[in-house]
Image (spheres, grey):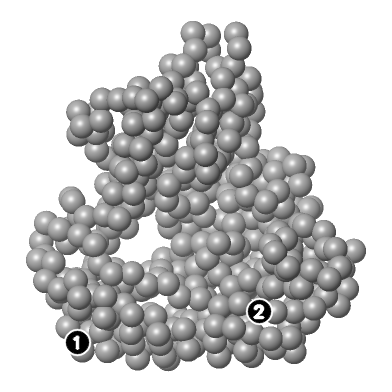
Amino acid sequence: MNRKKVDIITMGCSKNLVDSEQLMGLFEANGYTCTHDSENPDGEIVVVNTCGFIADAKEESINIILEFAQAKEEGRIEKLYVMGCLSERYLADLEKEIPEVDGWYGKFNYKQLLNDLQENQISDNNQYLRHITTPSHYAYLKISEGCDRHCAYCAIPIITGKHQSRPMDEILDEVRFLVEKGVKEFQVIAQELTYYGVDLYGEQRIAELVERMADIKGVEWIRLHYAYPTHFPWDLLRVMREKKNVCNYLDIALQHISDHMLTRMRRNVSKAETMALIERLRKEVPGIHIRTTLMVGFPGETEDDFQQLVDFTKWARFERMGAFAYSEEDGTYSANHYEDDVPDDVKQQRLDRLMRVQQNISAELEAEKVGQVLRVIIDRLEGDYFVGRTEYCSPEVDPEVLIRAEKPLEIGSFYKVKITDSEEFDLYGIVVEKEM
């Protein structure tokens, strides 16, 4: 049978990207040719992996589906399939509204797509098989799905269900498999990684998992994403201190700081506890870079609540911070119990003000790195510059290091780089030496 070309389009977060990579690996193991996020998809089959997290993401996913539905009507593609969060949540409505789609799959049954495409059973001999779409030296490593937290604004538990940890040995085997493929850097991701292990082992086991990962030969960097502030596993900080390949970096979404907002958001943490957490993180891991996400415009947010958030941002001086305006999501606690009473223009004004504050903080913190020699991994050549990152920078979202391309550098290799200049969100440097 002559296999066809498949275009995979991924919307949303890195957790979705891992699903797409696994599906592509499965397609290719069964003789198909795959491309990912092509600017001009030209395969016979298109698979759209959707996001259903917030209104803008849902709208973007629907628009992409409609675009390819039109392409199918015009005969430019033969088959259109949809998977991911949006179809997991709104399957019945989507099937009715967009009949041009040949098959709908959710977050967990997407591998069935291949069985539905061909008569014979698919080949799936290697459960770690993935088509890495990132630069070959780094990969995202998903350690769990779902979430047992029930924050008032969040639809993730509705979409993905309860927290499900992957068995530790399975994760470690995947790390070894990826190291053999040339991966040096691992972005450990989960909806809530600090809860890892509770469902399987009866206790938090994230510190043990990261420590065992760090002991695998060939693992150069481990970076942790999406921690939760309540019941933080403090032994993880010991692992950060003792294991040089565990980056001094933690992505921990805090959302707000006023007790009024934290209570209404059902975050199960107080202002005092949050501030104590920040202080302890910085004390136990000197030089740690904290990334957080904050929210403005949640129902009932007063000017005083917002001012507390601004003051907290100035106090905490987060190395990395993103923010967004509240978006009401169907089925969430806040949608069912609160009125979305902060006007959109007020939300935008607050968001703009908060990000201006962070912009100044980021500029100051990045400027402090000028003159330092930092370990940098090279991701790509872009125009006149090689672009790399330090251990304090996650791909796609954090500052990068730009090195003028006067001499060739090896993509995926580490270099000692002296920082010569800085901007609000980027650094400039010159190579001191290549790491052997």
Q: Label 1: how many residues lie within 10 Å, few (<14), some (14-19) or many (20+)?
A: few
Instruction: Name the residue located 46 percent from the left edge and 62 percent from the top edge.
Output: 226
| Amino acid at circle 1 | Glu
Between residues 12 and 154, which one lies in front from this camera angle? 12
**Rendered image: mark on residue 166:** none
Can you give x and y, in whole percent of width and height, for residue 10 in the image?
47, 43
| Amino acid at circle 2 | Leu
Q: Is residue 40 shown left or right of residue 126? A: left
Instruction: Name the residue located 48 percent from the left edge and 48 percent from the top edge.
Output: 15
Instruction: Name the residue located 52 percent from the left edge and 39 percent from the top edge.
Output: 40
User: Contact (CB < 8 A) between labels 2 and 1?
Assistant: no
Q: Is residue 240 shown left or right of residue 358? A: right
User: Mark 1 sits on what residue?
Assistant: 303
- Name the secondary structure under disc 1: helix
Q: Nearer the viewer, mark 2 or mark 1?
A: 2
Q: Is residue 137 shown left or right of residue 9? A: right
Q: Which of pointers 2 and 1 lies earlier in the amino acid sequence?
A: 1
Instruction: Name the residue located 59 percent from the left edge and 16 percent from the top edge.
Output: 3
Can you give x and y, in whole percent of width and height, for residue 273 in the image?
36, 81
Between residues 262 and 1, which one lies in front from this camera angle? 1
In this view, 37 is above or below 76: below
- Name the secondary structure under disc 2: strand
Between residues 405 and 207, which one lies in front from this camera angle? 405
User: Mark 2 sits on what residue?
Assistant: 427
Can you give x and y, in whole percent of width and height, for residue 107 in the image?
39, 37
